[in-house]
Image: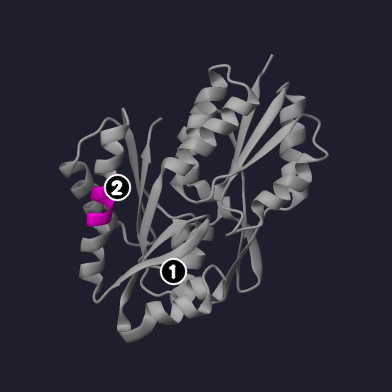
Amino acid sequence: MAGVAVVTDSTSSLGGDAVTRAEIAVISLQVVIDGQSRPESEVNPLLVAAALREGKRVTTSRPSPQAFAAVYDSLGAAGYQAVVSAHLSAKISGTCEAAEVAARAAPVPVTVVDSGSLGMVTGFAALSGAECALGGGSAGEVAATIRARAHASTMYFYVHNLDYLRRGGRIKAGAALIGSALAVKPLMTIADGEIRLHERVRTASKAFTRLRELGLAALARAASESPGVDIAVHHLDNREAAERLASELTGRVRTPGEVVISELSAVVGGHVGPGTVGVVIAPRL
């Protein structure tokens, strides 16, 4: 009999092969470009980058409780005894809330886990949870594994312009004004489930230098405390910079682990804008 199923959402940036191997179910958020809504899984992030550059209106929306209910029902019908549903921060999106609504009527017990972050912080945590589940772990053990790995992970990212985050309400208007003052380049992080301005530098080149320094420092800390560290470098239409950053990180501190270079999901990309580059450092526990 099947044990615990793991569910996550499309902003986790997990590739299809990883999802298949780990037996994770993925629920898609929605991307809306000039009023036309499509599942994120069907939208190329580069299309979002182009739309933003052309001045089109790009918004996003959470999955509906009905979408979650359909997945939970199918997992129950497949024989799973419990579900752990891990999603991006509840302070950034209403996805966890929709999952909670659906969980109350699900045919099997559902534990909703707020990763407190997004991107591959959630993705790596979900993979660890799935590994625990495939090894026979209980729902409580799977949920605890996901929470612990997400909490141990670090994310920093550079955005070219904070206005995209301000428009979507993901940061406060005051922070956006401070970050944009005097043409400074903002470096962001996620703390307590919120996207926050970490520091400001004067130029894009200095921003990338500082992003590398922050990534290396986080990697060195993680490597000193963990048997392995996974790295993800996200970007939106800035692959050359992402590849350079990944090379510099892995060239300085060598740790057993996976290195992933990927476009940001279309939903996340719609809020941070083209040119964004970010790094995730996720120690294995």
Amino acid at dot 2: Ala
Q: Position of residue 109 (x, y in %)?
A: 75, 30
Mark count: 2
Which residue is under mark 2?
218
Query: Where, quadrant-wise, is the N terminus in this rendering?
Result: top right
Which residue is under mark 1?
273
Q: Between label 1 and label 2, give the one nearer the viewer.
A: 2
- Which residue is painted at 47% across and 59% down in the image? 45
Q: Secondary structure at mark 2?
A: helix
Is residue 214 in the magenta section? yes
Identify whether 109 is placed above or below 100.
Answer: above
Question: Would you call the spot at circle 2 few (<14 residues within 10 Å), some (14-19), or many (20 or more)?
Answer: many
What span is colored magenta in the figure? 213-218
Question: Would you call the spot at circle 1 few (<14 residues within 10 Å), some (14-19), or many (20 or more)?
Answer: many
- Which residue is painted at 20% across and 62% down in the image? 209
Amino acid at dot 1: Gly
Q: Position of residue 41 (x, y in %)?
A: 56, 50
Q: Position of residue 262 (x, y in %)?
A: 38, 49
Q: Residue 5's quadrant in the figure? A: top right
Q: Residue 196's quadrant in the figure? A: bottom left
Residue nearest the observer in this picture, 201 or 239 = 201
- Which residue is painted at 24% across and 53% down in the image? 245
Q: Is residue 102 left or right of residue 143?
A: right
Task: Confirm whether residue 271 shows in the render.
Answer: yes
User: Magenta part mainly helix, strand or loop?
Assistant: helix
Is residue 22 in the magenta section? no
CA–CA distance in space, label 1 to label 2: 24 Å
Identify whether 49 is placed above or below 279.
Answer: below
